[in-house]
């Protein structure tokens, strides 16, 4: 079922792809829908390589995603450009050791959301 | 193995013995010692008192046992019977009588099975010739008013003796004869006593004990491993080697302790300990990478006057740091040692013996006294200390270290990682160890940033936690480096930006998704006098660092940009950063935090 959802999301995303990013789609599959104007959502608490996740933004903006290991050490930070609405991205895991991580979404230095995730 | 030995011990009895099947079996049952009911027979020592039960198993449902006597013969050179108890019905008449005195031994008839002990009572004989010297026989008898039943009707206690050189311990305690009857006559028409017939009273399953006792070694012996908290002690093991033969392979507990008492059985054998690990090769290499960092190289540079305005030759606080810093094992500390360590950090050079990151070549395990007391003068005089200069895991005889008269012996070890000059992954040196360098007014470190003697330092912010009494590294300063990965056109770019003052060196490792990205280049903007390095290691990771060897600060805001090419749709997760380290302009270690 998860693979099917991935496929659906991927087809949706590819159809909307602009430039080098996977971004800006009008609607997402229910599992990635976000209530409210802003936020981040994964399919589940477990992230596998290339799993999709959604960042919903009220306007075109830059966001940073910080990933900390179980000890609270920052191990990765990325900046992404989001369009207003839902933005579905791929999450790559092969540079990580398997384990528990804290993934947080930031905008203009302000923490928007924090999620506890297992990366495998 | 234990079962196998027991099987060998019992083999004679099992081979020749058979059950009475429908009569009475009498089992010579070993039940441990008075000190330890679970002690296996093959671990019984001289001066132990063993417990032997005579267990009845009445297989004849038509008759009861109201009379039983069993003759137990033993060699008094090897055993002394000290006491006995009975487990029989109330008002039973129980006796144990030594009827033979010293010098009587059974001669079994070959007309009946050896374990057919009623038959042997009738047809066997005794000798009192020279072969019987020291042999005695106990007559263990019970006359009961009611059925004794299938119970351990008697228990005998034998103190184990050293039979002397050349003593033959074969069958030194043995059931030779037995007789059993049912004296309840009212239950049969003839009011007759029923005697369990010939061939129907057997010593089974065990008829005798053959055991060569171990020495009377009562000391509890432990191996104690004191390692840095970054080392998982439960992944360290030790083999106990007796005269070249492995006797046990044991794992340290969380506290770094192993009880090897059960495997040290002779004061004359040579015992060695062989340490090894269950860490995978990859995990262990990671430990060496985490242990030996830029700050180790800088500390060596300071010691030899090749960093900033150093050169006092008093940068090391403990003697054990000298052999740790001597990366080329030439008996001196010089800039080449620092560059070797720096090469390790960069990933361009491996100074470990044989170029191996293996546990045995990177992780000296050193006797605690040696570790704590090793002095700079030992190093400069070329004093080779086992485990320090050998750069191998010890397999040293420990026999001579054991005090057999002591109730407890602790064989204590500490550990380090070759190249871990600042001892960040090494055991703390005891504060009263001779290896602690003397500190006077002229060379006393600044309290704000130097390692200090601290008997118990527990986790304040920015300080590494060290538990237990010893010397703690205290890192009171930290530095910050901003990291950010973005897609820039066709490239994936990780930008590292120094955001702290007073930093003269930093290092880190970049891990990236090698299946999707290709490492392209690194662009440093760290000033004109900074030595920068970036090298892709064999595993694909990129080692990056910058060092101002002159001891001046790398400018706040300096950047390092790492460029990758590849095909990804987002920058999230394709690059991670780890194994960070930094030093300040005094060459002191800083905690480098990513932000």
Image: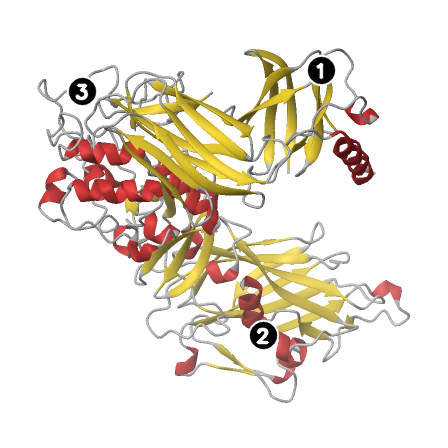
Disc 3 and disc 1 on one polypeptide chain:
no
* Residue at image point 76% right, 73% down: B195
Disc 2 to disc 1, how far (Cα)?
84 Å
Residue hosting label 1: A84
Frontmost residue, B185 versus B438: B438
Residue that badge 3 annotates = B445
Q: Are marks 2 and 1 on the same chain?
A: no
Q: Position of residue B442 (x, y in %)?
A: 8, 19
Q: Which residue is found at the position 46% from the left and 41% from the top?
A: B520
In this view, the residue in front, B106 or A74, is A74
The image shows residue B181, relative to residue B329, as above or below, that is below
Please identify, in this view, whether the residue under mark 3 or under mark 1 is nearer the observer.
1
Q: Secondary structure at mark 3?
A: loop
Q: Are marks 2 and 1 in contact (CB under 8 Å)?
A: no
Label 2: how many Cα within 10 Å (few below 14, some 14–19, many 20+): few
* Residue B208 location (% of width, % of height): 56, 70
Examine the rendered structure and indicate whether residue A115 appears above or below residue B189.
above
Element assignment for label 2: helix
Q: Residue furthest right?
A: B189
Task: Give the x, y percent position of residue B11.
Answer: 58, 74
**Residue B11 - label:** 2
């Amino acid at each position: 079922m998860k693979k099917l959802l991935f496929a659906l999301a991927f087809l949706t995303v590819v159809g909307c792809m602009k430039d080098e990013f996977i971004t800006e789609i009008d609607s997402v599959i229910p599992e990635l829908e976000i209530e409210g104007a802003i936020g981040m959502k994964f399919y589940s608490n477990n992230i596998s390589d290339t799993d999709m996740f959604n960042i919903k933004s009220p306007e075109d903006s830059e966001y940073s995603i910080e990933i900390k290991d179980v000890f609270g050490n920052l191990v990765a930070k990325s900046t992404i450009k989001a369009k207003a609405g839902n933005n579905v991205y791929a999450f790559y895991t092969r540079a990580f050791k398997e384990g528990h991580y804290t993934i947080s979404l930031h905008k203009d230095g302000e923490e928007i959301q924090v999620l506890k995730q297992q990366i495998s | 193995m234990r079962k196998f030995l027991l099987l060998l011990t019992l083999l004679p009895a099992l081979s020749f013995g058979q059950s009475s099947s429908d009569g009475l079996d009498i089992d010579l049952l070993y039940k441990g010692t008075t000190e330890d009911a679970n002690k296996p027979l093959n671990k019984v020592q001289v001066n132990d008192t063993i417990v032997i039960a005579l267990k009845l198993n009445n297989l004849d449902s038509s008759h009861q046992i109201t009379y039983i006597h069993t003759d137990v013969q033993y060699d008094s050179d090897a055993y002394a019977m000290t006491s006995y108890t009975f487990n029989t019905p109330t008002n039973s008449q129980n006796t144990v009588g030594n009827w033979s005195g010293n010098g009587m031994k059974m001669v079994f008839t070959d007309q009946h099975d050896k374990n057919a002990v009623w038959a042997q009572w009738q047809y066997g004989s005794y000798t009192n010739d020279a072969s019987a010297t020291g042999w005695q026989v106990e007559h263990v008898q019970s006359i009961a008013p009611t059925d004794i039943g299938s119970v351990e009707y008697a228990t005998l206690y034998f103190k184990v003796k050293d039979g002397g050189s050349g003593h033959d311990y074969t069958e030194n305690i043995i059931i030779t004869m037995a007789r059993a009857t049912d004296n309840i006559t009212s239950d049969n028409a003839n009011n007759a006593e029923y005697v369990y017939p010939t061939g129907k009273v057997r010593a089974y399953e065990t008829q005798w004990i053959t055991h060569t006792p171990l020495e009377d070694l009562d000391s509890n012996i432990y191996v104690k491993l004191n390692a840095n908290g970054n080392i998982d002690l439960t992944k360290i093991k030790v083999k106990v080697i007796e005269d070249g033969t492995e006797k046990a392979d044991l794992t340290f507990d969380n506290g770094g302790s192993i009880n090897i008492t059960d495997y040290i059985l002779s004061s004359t054998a040579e015992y060695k300990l062989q340490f090894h690990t269950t860490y995978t090769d990859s995990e262990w290499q990671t430990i060496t990478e985490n242990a030996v960092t830029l700050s180790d190289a800088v500390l060596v540079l300071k010691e030899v006057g090749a960093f900033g305005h150093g050169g006092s030759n008093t940068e090391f606080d403990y003697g054990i740091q000298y052999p740790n810093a001597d990366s080329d094992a030439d008996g001196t500390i010089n800039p080449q040692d620092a560059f070797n360590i720096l090469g390790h950090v960069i990933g361009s050079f491996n100074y470990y013996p044989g170029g191996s990151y293996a546990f045995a070549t990177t992780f000296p395990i050193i006797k605690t006294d040696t570790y704590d007391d090793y002095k700079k003068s030992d190093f400069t005089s070329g004093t080779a200390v086992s485990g320090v200069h050998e750069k191998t895991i010890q397999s040293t005889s420990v026999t001579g270290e054991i005090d057999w008269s002591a109730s407890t012996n602790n064989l204590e070890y500490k550990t380090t990682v070759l190249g871990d000059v600042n001892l960040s992954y090494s055991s703390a040196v005891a504060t009263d160890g001779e290896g602690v360098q003397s500190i006077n007014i002229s060379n006393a470190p600044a309290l704000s940033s130097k390692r200090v003697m601290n008997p118990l330092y527990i986790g304040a912010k920015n300080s590494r936690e060290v538990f237990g009494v010893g010397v703690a590294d205290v890192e009171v300063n930290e530095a910050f480096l901003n990291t950010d990965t973005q897609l820039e056109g066709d490239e994936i770019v990780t930008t590292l930006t120094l955001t702290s003052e007073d930093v003269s060196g930093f290092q880190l490792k970049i891990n990236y998704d090698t299946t999707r990205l290709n490492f392209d280049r690194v662009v440093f903007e760290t000033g004109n006098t900074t030595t920068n390095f970036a090298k892709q290691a064999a595993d694909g990771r990129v080692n990056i660092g910058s060092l101002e060897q002159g001891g001046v600060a790398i400018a706040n805001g300096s950047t390092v940009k790492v460029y990758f090419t590849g095909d990804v749709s987002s920058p999230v997760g394709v690059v991670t950063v780890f194994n960070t380290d930094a030093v300040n302009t005094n060459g002191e270690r800083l905690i480098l935090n990513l932000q």
